Image (tube, grey):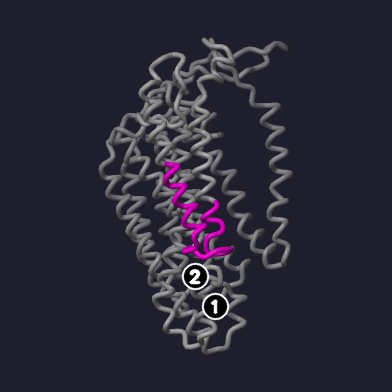
Amino acid sequence: MSAIVVSDLVSVRHRGKYMAVMLTAYLLGAVSGPLLGGVLVQAGAWRWVFWLPVPFGVVSFLVLAFFLKGKVRDADSSRRERLRRVDYGGNVVLTAATGSMLYAVTYGGSEYLWSDARIIASLTAGVLGLGLFLLLERHLSRRSSSNNAVEPVMPLRLLNHREGATVAAGAFASSLLSNWANFLLPVYFQGVRMSTPSRAGVQLLPIVAVAVPASIVSVVLVSKLGRYKVLHVAGFAGMCVACGLFSILDAASGDEEWILMEVLFSLGLGMVINTLLPAFQGAVGESDQAVATSTFTFVQSLANIWSVTMPASIFNNRFGALAGRISDEQVRAQLGGGRAYGFATRAFLEGLQEKARVEVVDVFGEAVSGVWYVAAGIAGVAALLACAEGEVVLREKLETDFALEEKVGGEVKVDERSSSK
């Protein structure tokens, strides 16, 4: 939502400066979150992870309610007419499809095996639902030329040209790889290096400490220079190399090795994670800015779903192929059937006999390496697609129907100033 507000009030060329402010706020939470979360989990107070955001949410809601006063300039339709144009069918189908996939990735590998019929059915229903959603959006896009027609949630015209398609693919890949690292590195730290949850949170800090500043610098460069393609190519190439290097980590690797690899990965991630949106918005007209932002966010959200399923599935399959190295049949059976991912913790390993622990750690390490090979391939494909981007000129002038309300002499007025700032 914050990205949509900024896109309605600031030109594409200059949005980077405002995104940098938002990223600074994100940095505070990203640095403190893993540390605090790890401490709470280790102390057995994990429920507080869900309670702590509540006061921050309440304060944020009050700030928005009192200070964000927006208005549509010269609205040419009533509220009832605008509500009639909402794509309710698309929203329902999309929500149901996404919920079905979320159910699968939430309970697959924990409550049920990935091969369980309920998980397979849920994933299948989610994928088919997405297909139905795209067909529905295609139908609505053909009829949206009429003033009274329903406006599709995700107009496919945003993706039917090279720039939109390649940048959307980059958005999917960047979100996928970002969460891939956040899910897989703790498996390495806890399941191979036998770190505690709180220490694993500390070991993730190099990613946050480098990625966010790199992202701030990147979006400012886009604002100053109006160029982004070189950042996308270099960023995905850097992540490709970093993922390949992650695959060689094992229990004997030194701290300096994984720290340098995290720094390289974070530099690449910072170059792309927040410069893709201006590129996507720059490829469409001003009237499509809000829907382009929501479409971009949806692509990222879809990647977030698969960023859990894919590494967990690859890890479990790889572990199953190597499980014969574990001599203890009871331990092998306990970790089999797609359950290995959930047992990659120090607490589990400390409960094993020395011989079994060494064997399990060795298999965990090789299974993690196999997952990084796939990540490197995804980053490599994304780098090639970035080379195919058609760099567009980012507009410095903004034409929008939205404005902020300001109090002038005790009266509320709509800000009519030029938005080409």
- The residue under the point 42% across, 51% down is 269
With 225 as the anchor, is 252 left or right in this view?
Answer: right
Q: Nearer the viewer, residue 322 or 213?
A: 322
Q: Is residue 72 magenta?
A: no
Q: Main secondary structure of the magenta part?
A: helix
| Disc 2, SS | helix
Residue receiving disc 2: 188
Residue receiving disc 1: 334
Residue 415 horizontal/vertical position (percent): 58, 15
Res. 64 mark: none
Is residue 299 depicted above or below 292 in this figure?
Answer: below
Residue 264 seen from this side: yes
| Residue type, label 1 | Gln
Label 2 environment density (alpha carbons within 10 Å; few <14, some 14–19, many ≥20): many
With 242 as the anchor, is 213 left or right in this view?
Answer: right
- The residue under the point 43% across, 73% down is 319
With 50 as the anchor, is 177 left or right in this view?
Answer: left
- The residue under the point 43% across, 54% down is 177
Bounds of the magenta segment: 103-130
Is residue 338 depicted above or below 181 in this figure?
Answer: below
Mark found first going from the N terminus, 2 or 1: 2
Is residue 258 depicted above or below 136 in this figure?
Answer: below
